[in-house]
Amino acid sequence: MEAKNETAVTAQFTKGQKIAVFSIREVADKTDKEKKNSFWLRVGRAFVNSDGSLNVQLDAMPLDGKLNLRIDLPKAERKHEGAEGFEAEAA
């Protein structure tokens, strides 16, 4: 059995922290059908409770049922070069 190269990442949320909720959509490139482009669509927000649990408020439902939660950092602190939707949609 081949071992997968996985990196464990632990996110730690703190009380009162704001979290951005995104749906990441992949669409076929118009000129190259083999290539897919992705864009990030902000579909809601989440807030951390005192016990560490999350309250999630969705403005839209993702078609594929998948959500991506990111700590809502100020624009100057974001490091996601390929996430144009993240930078454009986050307020």
Image (cartoon, grey):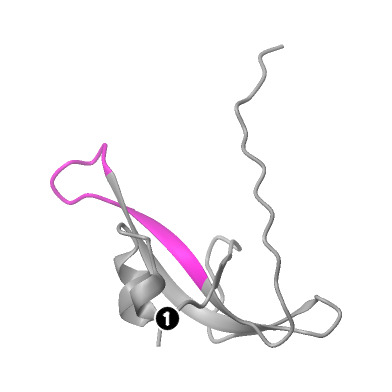
Magenta includes 26?
Answer: yes
Inspect the image, locate mark 1, and give the three-letter code of the amino acid beneath it.
Answer: Pro
Q: Residue at 81% across / 75% down in the picture?
A: 52
Res. 77 image quadrant: bottom left
Residue at the extreme front of the image, as rendered: 77
Determine whether 69 is above or below 26 in the image.
below
Q: Residue at 65% across / 49% down in the picture?
A: 9
Q: Which residue is mark 1?
A: 74
Q: Residue at 36% across / 78% down in the picture?
A: 75
* Quarter of the image with the C terminus in it: bottom left
* Quarter of the image with the N terminus in it: top right
Task: Tell which of 15 and 19 is nearer to you.
Answer: 15
Res. 83 image quadrant: bottom left
Q: Position of residue 74 (x, y in %)?
A: 42, 81
Left or right? Give the position of 9 relative to 15: left
Magenta includes 53?
Answer: no
Residue at the extreme right of the image, as rendered: 51
Q: Position of residue 20 (x, y in %)?
A: 53, 77
Residue stretch in magenta: 22-35
Left or right? Give the position of 49 relative to 68: right
Asked which secondary structure carries label 1, the reply is: loop
